[in-house]
Image (cartoon, rainbow, N blue to C red):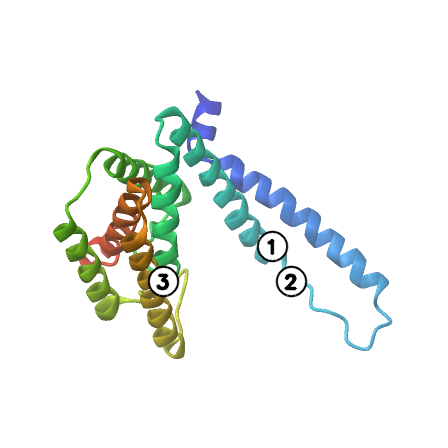
Amino acid sequence: MKYIKYLLTFRYIKLISYISARYLHNKMKEYHKKEHDTDKPKKIYNRYTYYYGFQIIIGGINKFLLLITLGILLNILPYLILTTLSFISLRIWTGGLHLDSYSKCTYVSLLSFTLIALLAKYIILGQFINISIFLIIYFLILIYAPISHPNRPIKEKQKIKFKLIALFSLSILTIIHSFTNSIIISNSIIYGILLAGLIMLPIVNKLR
């Protein structure tokens, strides 16, 4: 039971990140000792900086592998990949909901991406609804994006830049959606940007 809980809470990611960070930190210290004669020795980051970086990388790989597994098991892999890519292409610039733990974030992400991939596969929306969704997402970006968060603070001078890139990304997705003959691609884009729009809403961002 103890080991199952250990796996379900993804604590192994923290362990792997800690071991990797300690190894890299020690290696960097050894390297800079050898380079001590240089005029301007490079900065050695503290172990926590490496630990945080490894958590992001390993955590991302873990989510990706779980998503791929779910996509294969549920026979929705193309939809899952395309909806996730559409979502990320906006989310990275717009920001939005952040949960307070990696395990909670992982489970909510897996559930959300799986649900929108299933919707993309089985529910085809009409042209009017598709156009309405694009217009709503444009409006949400103009009003709310980018959304800052303590874990990802956005400087004032970056806000306009992020907003413009988000609008540009949405425009690219709009063009792809308009000219593609693939239902898989067009439907995946719609549901992907719809999820990105939902997590920009103030009422959703109150959730933790």
Residue type, mark 2 in image:
Tyr
Assign a secondary structure to mark 2.
loop
Q: Which numbered disc, 2 or 3, marks the residue closer to the eye?
A: 3
Q: Could you say which is closer to the camera, residue 132 or residue 20?
A: 132
Q: Confirm or deny contact between disc 2 and disc 3 (CB under 8 A).
A: no
Q: Could you say which is closer to the camera, residue 45 or residue 129?
A: 129
Residue assigned mark 3:
169
Assign a secondary structure to mark 1.
helix
Residue type, mark 1 in image:
Tyr
Answer with left or right where residue 16 lies relative to residue 64: right
Residue 7 picture location, percent across and down: 47, 29
Alpha carbon distance from label 2 to label 3: 34 Å
Within-10-Å neighbours for mark 1: few <14, some 14–19, many 20+ = some
Residue type, mark 3 in image:
Ser
Answer with left or right where residue 199 lies relative to residue 71: left
Residue assigned mark 1:
50
Alpha carbon distance from label 3 to label 1: 31 Å
Q: Which numbered disc, 3 or 1, marks the residue closer to the eye?
A: 3
Q: Quadrant of residue 70?
A: top left
Question: What residue is rendered at 34% in x and 51% in y?
Answer: 87
Q: Is residue 148 visible?
A: no
Q: Quick one: label 2 or label 3, which is nearer the N terminus?
A: 2
Q: Is residue 163 visible?
A: yes
Question: What residue is rendered at 69% in x and 68% in y?
Answer: 43
Alpha carbon distance from label 1 to label 2: 7 Å
Q: Quadrant of residue 104?
A: top left
Q: Quick one: label 1 or label 2, which is nearer the N terminus?
A: 2
Q: Quadrant of residue 58?
A: top right
Which label was assigned to residue 45? Answer: 2
Residue 54 picture location, percent across and down: 57, 49
Answer with left or right where residue 54 lies relative to residue 6: right
Q: Confirm or deny contact between disc 1 and disc 2 (CB under 8 A).
A: yes
